[in-house]
């Protein structure tokens, strides 16, 4: 696979673009499920950057970080979706702005 | 292998896979009839072999109807997912020395990934039908398949530990001396059961249990789309059988007492047919468990067994490394 | 050159699918696009010589995490009225501000990344190498990850269990 | 043949862990088999080790792995095995096995059978680590391990708060000594750069002259640790209270093994003590004073176990006396014989208590001679050995100590006279116990006779108490050879005759009643003295007045001191700021996200600015 001729910064651009899109999604959506999905996109963008950098140096460290991100994502989704079910049951809606009772 | 040969092989696997899946429908019904003391399809052609053609004609010419309450985009997408992923899964199966489409260094993980993607077909089919039975069937299959995927993956790690590679060719070659069905008997046991659950074949076909859920996730499907689900299921059966043979029964290798006059591909086919027949026998012989029993079996029996298997294998490997 | 082409095609697919996923009103459709985007990223991983990451992306991200999403959406059973509401929530007046912010961030990122040089691929980093460094220098991180997963499992169980008990 | 040394401490440890984890699932017979069997197996292995060692008496040093590595400090998990270790291990596993066997019947009807054996096995493991350790840090691990087990076992019947109090007292008082010992270890390490005992002694002898100050300091600190663990003056007050635990525990921990750890520590580091004659004199004086104080106290007690506890303190005082006058072999010898006969006495008292419904008061017993013959004979033999009557094991060891004390350079005769006084008292109180409990008329009647699992350890320990004096310890290579002259004949004669005279006196006083000390006891000063001795020379009271109460007082007034006000103000400031900042919690998630993004953009902008600025 040595004939791959992609500059590293193209890959990082892709990662940055995905990250921005995911961030935009987090900011504009009100449905909690979409917010969780957007967070997944952001995590994936980070993972892409890590793996790309690891590939650039030919080191496994990037993929190690990818595994860590994966476990974070898995834990986050498990807890997050549990919360989604709870919110749906308590507020009868998935609107993030309705769940605003925790304030100072 | 040249590119042309590769393309030919790929095409023949695609065509062969679909044909085999079709033949399997007939073969299963014949065998079931035989084991359950009834006749099975025997009207059309010798031994009822023409039944296959009749079924195809019926399915092809049926009205391709999408229920108005369904989510059309997802409804149409769902059946293609299982066919696509199962077909992709065949890409890594080594049928004979050198006869495989690609020898991935992550072959086993690729197989796991493809069988993981097959979940979507059932899940999305159930969801898009907008039907209570279909939804329940989809929910059941999602938890069943996601759960059993865990031990399916874990049960294979013993094999990977012994071989030191995810490549299926390496795994087959590592069985030169002794097949892994002896050293990995626990892994084989779990993998067979998880394989049945993954392809939701009869003892574990809770997602489509007729008496509870009519036909489960594919209640609303008919015609060609239904045929694709069926095809996907039989392809899955064939793929799991190929994997069992490759991982635990030495793949294309035969017992050495037979010498090498039997071609490897024949060995492979014989073993696969044997395993498929075993699955059909299971369907004929074992009643369906309750859904909670199925999940209990998975998390409370299978998972501990796989973990014990992993621990034992690891300990023995470390010990052998110390000794050697 | 085949790999390079594949890379750019997958990048385009990933971007398009992600944008589509972020703008759908139907959660299931958005998820399907997201899965496509993940698969495209898996292909990119494979092409840049990280087959292990690619396999994990398919097995765990697309095969397990996204299944959980679908699962939850099935349990919530969002109807047609949900779609209409989502459409109302996606008015330009809502997203124009955040979009500006994102674009500013993107521009900054591009400036920062722009100075990076070099090619991506230096050959394949095999699963074995990843495993060796996971259980070698990064073993503490593995332990931490296992703690995290345990905490996630306990948390999810706790949240879900209360749900079941209240219903019963 | 050294391969299996590690098995000896590991076996009880594994059994202990199994019992802890599986206590709910195991039957009583399984628990007993595990608990007793593991120690029995360890004893068999120790026997095999002893057989090998006696044929080829070379010290064995096995390094397993480096425990930790911090700069120069790299203690290892390693065992050092020589004659002294062998003696200790034989006592721990041999006597320990007999006591475990005894316990299996004694505790049979207790609800926490598994917990008991788990603790007891853990104790044996920790004690073995203590004596096998090749460095002082690993030894300290075992040292604290036995302390923990002692705490757990003294408070074994924690349902009564008094037992918990006794356990805490034992723990805290020994902790005072342990802290001193830890400081001693730190000083040793900073001075010599190693904690390995053999290296350390060699380095110390190379570095310091005899009589230097630093060895004196180290020795005194080590002595404080030893005094805490071995219940020597002034840290002895925990041991009588520790009798709250089950009697076999008292036999194992508070008579035969743990309390002798201090003796072992000093014997093990005798190379350091040889550098500091002053420290040795302190050891001898502490030992002598302890032995006298405890002997007087034992004379006035009513509780059978407290008598034995004070007797233990007194006997360990003898061992310290021996160590202090440089009679290393005699001290360790007395340690061994004392383990035999004191375990015997404790187990005998355990048998009595077991059969008399937990009666502890000796004046409520009596006439048990004919009804509990096995116990009677074992008690008689044990008391004879304790009183050092000729031909018993105690005689050989105590006689050796007294003779060597006489020859000590400065204050030898004084130590000898003190020791003789102690011996006389020992004979009196031990036979007072025998005469009151087993002779005279019966006040209570035992409801059962002991079973074989209690009888066999008693009989075996009887045999050991009788013939233990003929053992010769394989410690010639460990300790410097005594080259003392043999003292005059009359010294020896007096040493032998004093215990016999004591027994005779006890007979006159408590059995024959030819001597009636009534007028003495009834007099005002006699009553006061009796009360004084009964309360253990009022030392507990003194500690309460001098230490405990002032501490409470300081703690009470320290609650409202001005420094606290300063910290209060920090708290108030924080609370105010927190109230202000928590206004920012609007509860609107997207607000948070947007502010995070703005912050991110700001930081990236800053870094961009600096990158650009650098270029």
Image (cartoon, coloured by chain):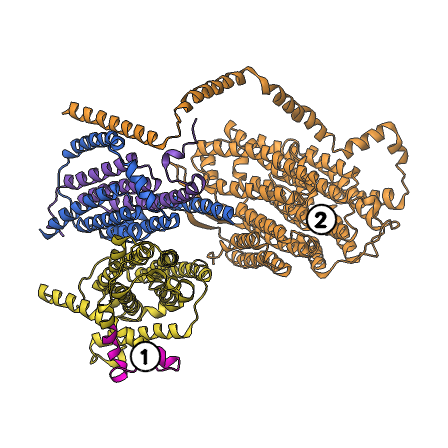
The residue nearer to you, when weighing D210 against D512, is D512
Colour for chain C in the figure: blue
* Rendered colour, chain D: orange
Residue D209 x/y as whole percent: 49, 31
Residue numbers of the magenta segment: B31-55
- Badge 1: chain ID: B
Q: Residue D490: image x %, image y %? A: 74, 41
What chain is the purple one?
A
- The stretch drawn in magenta includes residue B44: yes
Mark 2 — on which chain does it sit?
A: D
Q: Residue furthest front?
A: B68
- Total residue callouts: 2
Query: Which of the two residues, D305 or D136, is positioned nearer the viewer here?
Result: D305
Give the alpha-carbon distance from disc 2 to disc 1, as whole Å.
83 Å
Q: Which chain, by letter, is yellow?
A: B
Name the residue beneath numbered marker 2: D346
- Kind of element beneath mark 1: helix
Binning the other alpha carbons within 10 Å of mark 1 as few (below 14), some (14 to 19) or many (20 upward) gives many
Q: Quadrant of residue D292?
A: top right
**Are circles 2 and 1 on residues that touch, CB within 8 Å?**
no
Assign the C terminus of chain D to one quadrant of the image. Answer: top left
Q: Is residue A87 magenta?
A: no
Q: Which residue is mark 1?
A: B30
Q: Position of residue B58 (x, y in %)?
A: 24, 71
Compared to residue B258, the image places residue D614 above or below, namely: above
């Amino acid at each position: 696979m040595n004939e791959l001729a992609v500059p590293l910064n193209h890959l990082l651009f892709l990662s940055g673009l995905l990250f921005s899109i995911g961030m935009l999604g987090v900011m504009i959506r009100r449905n909690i499920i979409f917010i969780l999905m957007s967070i997944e996109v952001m995590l994936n963008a980070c993972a892409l950057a890590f793996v790309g950098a690891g590939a650039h140096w030919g080191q496994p460290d990037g993929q190690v970080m990818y595994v860590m991100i994966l476990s974070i994502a898995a834990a986050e989704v498990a807890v997050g979706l549990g919360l989604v079910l709870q919110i749906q049951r308590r507020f009868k809606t998935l609107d993030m702005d309705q769940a605003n009772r925790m304030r100072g | 292998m040249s590119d042309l040969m590769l393309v030919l092989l790929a095409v023949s696997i695609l065509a062969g896979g679909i044909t085999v899946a079709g033949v399997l429908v007939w073969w299963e019904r014949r065998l079931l009839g035989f084991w359950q003391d009834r006749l099975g399809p025997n009207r059309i052609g010798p031994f009822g072999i023409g039944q296959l053609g009749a079924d195809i004609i019926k399915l092809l010419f049926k009205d391709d109807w999408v229920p108005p309450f369904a989510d059309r985009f997802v409804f149409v997408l769902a059946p293609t997912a299982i066919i696509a992923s199962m077909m992709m899964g065949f890409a890594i199966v080594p049928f004979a020395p050198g006869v495989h489409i690609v020898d991935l260094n992550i072959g086993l993980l690729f197989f796991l990934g493809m069988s993981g993607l097959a979940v979507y077909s059932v899940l999305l089919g159930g969801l898009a039908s907008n039907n209570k039975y279909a939804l329940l069937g989809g929910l059941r299959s999602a938890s069943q398949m996601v759960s059993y995927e865990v031990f399916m993956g874990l049960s294979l790690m013993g094999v990977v530990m012994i071989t030191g590679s995810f490549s299926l060719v390496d795994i087959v070659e590592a069985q030169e001396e002794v097949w892994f069905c002896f050293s990995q008997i626990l892994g084989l046991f779990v993998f067979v059961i998880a394989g049945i659950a993954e392809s939701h074949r009869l003892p574990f076909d809770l997602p489509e249990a007729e008496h509870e859920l009519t036909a489960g996730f594919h209640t609303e499907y008919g015609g060609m789309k239904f045929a694709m689900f069926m095809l996907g299921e039989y392809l899955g059966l064939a793929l799991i059988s190929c994997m069992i043979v490759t991982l635990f029964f030495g793949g294309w290798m035969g017992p050495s007492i037979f010498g090498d006059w039997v071609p490897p591909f024949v060995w492979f086919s014989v073993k696969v047919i044997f395993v498929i027949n075993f699955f059909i026998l299971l369907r004929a012989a074992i009643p369906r468990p309750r859904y909670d029993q199925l999940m209990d079996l998975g998390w409370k029996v299978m998972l501990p067994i796989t973990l014990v298997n992993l621990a034992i294998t690891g300990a023995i490997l470390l010990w052998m490394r110390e000794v050697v | 050159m085949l790999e390079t082409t594949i890379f750019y095609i997958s990048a385009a697919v990933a971007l398009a699918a992600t944008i589509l996923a972020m703008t759908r009103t139907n959660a299931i459709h958005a998820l399907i696009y997201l899965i496509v985007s993940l698969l495209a990223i898996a292909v990119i991983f494979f092409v840049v010589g990280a087959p292990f990451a690619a396999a994990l992306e398919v097995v765990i991200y697309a095969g397990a995490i996204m299944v959980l999403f679908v699962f939850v959406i099935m349990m919530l059973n969002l109807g047609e009225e949900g779609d209409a509401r989502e459409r109302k929530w996606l008015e330009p007046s809502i997203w124009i501000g955040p979009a500006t912010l994102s674009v500013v961030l993107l521009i900054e990122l591009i400036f920062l990344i722009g100075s990076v040089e070099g090619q991506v691929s230096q050959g394949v980093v095999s699963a074995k190498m990843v495993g060796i460094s996971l259980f070698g220098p990064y073993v503490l991180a593995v332990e931490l990850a296992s703690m995290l997963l345990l905490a996630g499992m306990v948390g999810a169980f706790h949240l879900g269990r209360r749900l079941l008990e209240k219903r019963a | 043949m050294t391969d299996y040394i590690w098995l000896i401490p590991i076996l009880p440890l594994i059994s202990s862990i199994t019992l802890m984890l599986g206590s709910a699932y195991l039957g009583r017979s399984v628990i007993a088999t595990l608990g007793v069997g593991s120690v029995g197996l360890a004893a068999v292995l120790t026997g095999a080790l002893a057989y090998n060692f006696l044929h080829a008496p070379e010290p064995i040093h096995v390094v397993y792995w480096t425990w930790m590595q911090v700069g120069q400090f790299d203690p290892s998990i390693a065992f050092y095995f020589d004659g002294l270790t062998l003696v200790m291990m034989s006592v721990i596993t041999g006597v320990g096995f007999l006591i475990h066997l005894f316990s299996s019947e004694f505790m049979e009807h207790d609800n926490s059978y598994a917990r008991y054996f788990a603790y007891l096995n853990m104790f044996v493991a920790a004690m073995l680590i203590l004596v096998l350790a090749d460095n002082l840090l690993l030894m300290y691990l075992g040292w604290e391990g036995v302390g923990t087990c002692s705490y757990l076992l003294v408070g074994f019947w924690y349902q009564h708060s008094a037992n918990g109090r006794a356990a805490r007292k034992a723990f805290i008082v020994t902790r005072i000594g342990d802290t001193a010992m830890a400081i001693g270890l730190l000083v040793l390490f900073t001075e010599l750069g190693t904690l390995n005992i053999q290296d350390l002694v060699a380095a110390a002898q190379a570095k310091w002259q005899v009589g230097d100050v630093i060895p004196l300091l180290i020795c005194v600190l080590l002595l404080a640790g030893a005094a805490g663990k071995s219940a020597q003056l002034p840290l002895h007050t925990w041991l009588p209270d520790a009798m709250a635990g089950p009697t076999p525990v008292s036999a194992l921990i508070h008579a035969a093994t743990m309390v002798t750890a201090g003796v072992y520590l000093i014997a093990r580091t005798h190379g350091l003590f040889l550098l500091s004659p002053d420290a040795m004199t302190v050891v001898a004086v502490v030992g002598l004073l302890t032995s006298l104080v405890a002997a007087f106290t034992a004379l006035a007690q009513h509780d059978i176990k407290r008598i034995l506890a004070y007797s233990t303190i007194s006997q360990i005082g003898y061992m310290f006396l021996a160590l202090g006058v440089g009679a290393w072999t005699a001290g360790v010898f007395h340690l061994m014989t004392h383990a035999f006969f004191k375990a015997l006495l404790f187990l005998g008292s355990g048998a009595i208590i077991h059969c008399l419904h937990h009666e502890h008061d000796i004046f409520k017993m009596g006439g048990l001679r004919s009804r509990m013959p096995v116990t009677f004979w074992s008690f008689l033999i044990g008391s004879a050995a304790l009183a050092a009557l000729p031909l018993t094991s105690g005689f050989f060891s105590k006689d050796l100590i007294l003779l060597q004390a006489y020859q000590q350079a400065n204050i030898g005769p004084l130590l000898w006279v003190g020791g003789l006084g102690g011996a006389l008292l020992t004979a009196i109180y031990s036979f007072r116990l025998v005469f009151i409990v087993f002779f005279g008329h019966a006040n209570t009647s035992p409801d059962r006779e002991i079973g074989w699992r209690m009888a066999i350890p008693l009989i075996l320990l009887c045999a050991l108490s009788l013939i233990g004096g003929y053992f010769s310890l394989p410690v010639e290579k460990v300790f410097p050879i005594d080259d003392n002259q043999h003292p005059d004949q009359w010294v020896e004669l007096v040493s032998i005759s004093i215990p016999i005279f004591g027994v005779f006196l006890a007979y006159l006083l408590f059995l024959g009643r030819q001597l009636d000390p009534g007028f003495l006891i009834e007099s005002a000063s006699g009553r006061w003295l009796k009360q004084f001795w009964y309360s253990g020379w009022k030392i507990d009271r003194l500690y309460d007045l001098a230490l405990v109460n002032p501490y409470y007082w300081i703690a009470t007034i320290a609650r409202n001191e001005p420094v606290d006000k300063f910290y209060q103000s920090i708290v108030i400031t924080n609370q105010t700021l927190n109230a202000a900042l928590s206004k920012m919690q609007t509860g609107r998630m997207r607000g948070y996200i947007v502010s995070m993004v703005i912050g991110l953009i700001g930081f990236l902008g800053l870094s961009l600015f600096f990158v650009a600025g650098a270029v």
